[in-house]
Structure formats: C-alpha cells, structure tokens
Image (tube, rainbow, N blue to C red):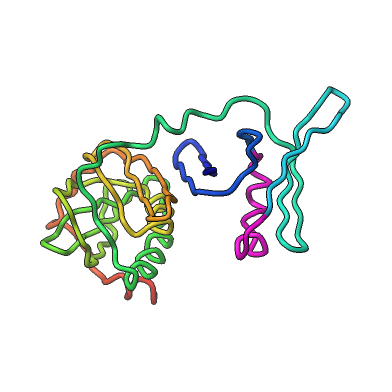
Amino acid sequence: GGLLVATDGRRLAGAPATVPTAGSFILPSGAVHVLGHPDFRKRPATVTLTETESGGGEEQLVSFRSEDHLVISKTLPGSYPNWKQVVPRDMVSSLTITDDRRPALLTWLRSLRGAEGSVTLHRKRRGVLQLVHSDRGSITATVEVPMEQSGELQPISLDPGFLATALRIAPTLWFTDSMSPVIARRADGAFCVIMPMRFTGVPAQRTGTKASSSDQAAA
C-alpha cells in the first residue's frame, strides 16, 4: 500500500512500493540517484527506518538493502509538497503509442536540444499523431507515429525531455485541455505528471522537415 513520489518542481512521478509502516520519509536526491543504479533496480530492495542519537538530538536513518548492496541515508526534515493536489482528475481524452514505436520516439525526443524548444502534439488524421519540434519560433523537425486515441485531442506543447520522461514510464498519455497537466499512467499504478508549455499555435500543415521516428533514431 505504499507509494514513492518524486518531483523536481516541474515533473512529478510516482510508483507503488512496499515501504515501512512507520510513516512517510523524505530522501535527499543524492540517495535517490544511487538507488537508480541497476543493482537496486533489477531486484526488490528491503527498506528499514531507524532512529539514532546525534549531536543535535535524534535523527532518522533509512536503509535500502538489495542482496549484498546497502545504502544508508539520512532523511530530510520538513513536509513534502502536497503532490496529490498536482495529480489531475477527470481526464477527458488519451493517446497511446504502441510499444514497437515508443523506443524510436524516445530516442528522437532525447536528441532534441534548445533551451526554448518545445514539441507540439497534433492529431494529423485518424490514428496518426504528429509531433512538431520548434525552437525559438522556428520549426526544426516533425515526426508522425501511429496512435490509439480516445476523446478529442487538442494541440498541446510540451518540453521534449519531459515528454520523454512521461512516455518512458507509460505509453498512454491522458489530457484535459491545452493548458492542464498531462498524466502518463501504467496499469500497475506508476504515473508521471508533466506541465504543458505555452501553446505555440504552430499549425500542422506548416511543418518543415518530416521524418519517421525510426529515421530520427537511426540518425
């Protein structure tokens, strides 16, 4: 019944987990990065909370053991942000990228650079999603991929790196409108919430260079 939630203030992700019943705890980001190592990701880890005396009083330690690997970290004091307030409800439409197309699309999204870059998602035609990358107002590339769609899909602009994060977690994106948070959710309860960027209003027919996601991945 536990849940791990992480946020950097711009993205928020969560995943179900078995955690101690002593209550919630906050991990420093350094410990989280260590736990991202394959030795901890490829098998379940046992989580233990302990209280210990220090010079300034009691402090809480949390340990993660995965076979012969052990990480011990102090927890952070204070209250975690009210993440439940960020998770959208009553999503009205969705799109799903098939598993055979998702790896190449992720490679393309991660290859995009530019501090002001964005990717705008359009419904090109039935069953086809068009992603238009623009940077500083200029279109640099487009990609078209098959999709499964439910409801009406309004054009929405997203940070390409954040979109890659969401699609890596889950193949289905849920939407409300062009300015509301987007959520990717898996059947096992893992999810990711990302905020949209200001809609660029780039119409799909003005796109320049067009390439398939597999072409971009190969490049």
In the drawing, does residue 142 fall left or right of residue 50?
left
What segment carries the magenta color? 27-45
Seen from the viewer's position, the closer of residues 3 and 98 is 3
State the image coordinates of residue 110 (x, y, percent, origin top left). 43, 60
Q: Residue furthest right?
A: 55
Seen from the viewer's position, the closer of residues 150 and 29 is 150
In the drawing, does residue 115 fall left or right of residue 154?
right
Residue shown at 32% from the left, 39% from the top: 181
State the image coordinates of residue 153 (x, y, percent, origin top left). 17, 49
Residue shown at 39% from the left, 43% from the top: 193
Question: Where is residue 143, by image quadrant?
Answer: bottom left
Residue shown at 74% from the left, 43% from the top: 73
Depicted 167 relative to depicted 1: above or below = below
Seen from the viewer's position, the closer of residues 209 and 197 is 197
Depicted 132 relative to depicted 192: above or below = below
Magenta segment includes 31? yes
State the image coordinates of residue 56 (x, y, percent, origin top left). 84, 22
Depicted 137 relative to depicted 57: above or below = below
- Give the number of callouts: 0
In the drawing, does residue 152 fall left or right of residue 121?
left
Magenta segment includes 24? no
Seen from the viewer's position, the closer of residues 111 and 11 is 11
Q: Residue furthest top?
A: 56
Residue shown at 60% from the left, 61% from the top: 41
State the image coordinates of residue 85 (x, y, percent, origin top left). 40, 29
Q: Which quadrant: the C terminus? A: bottom left
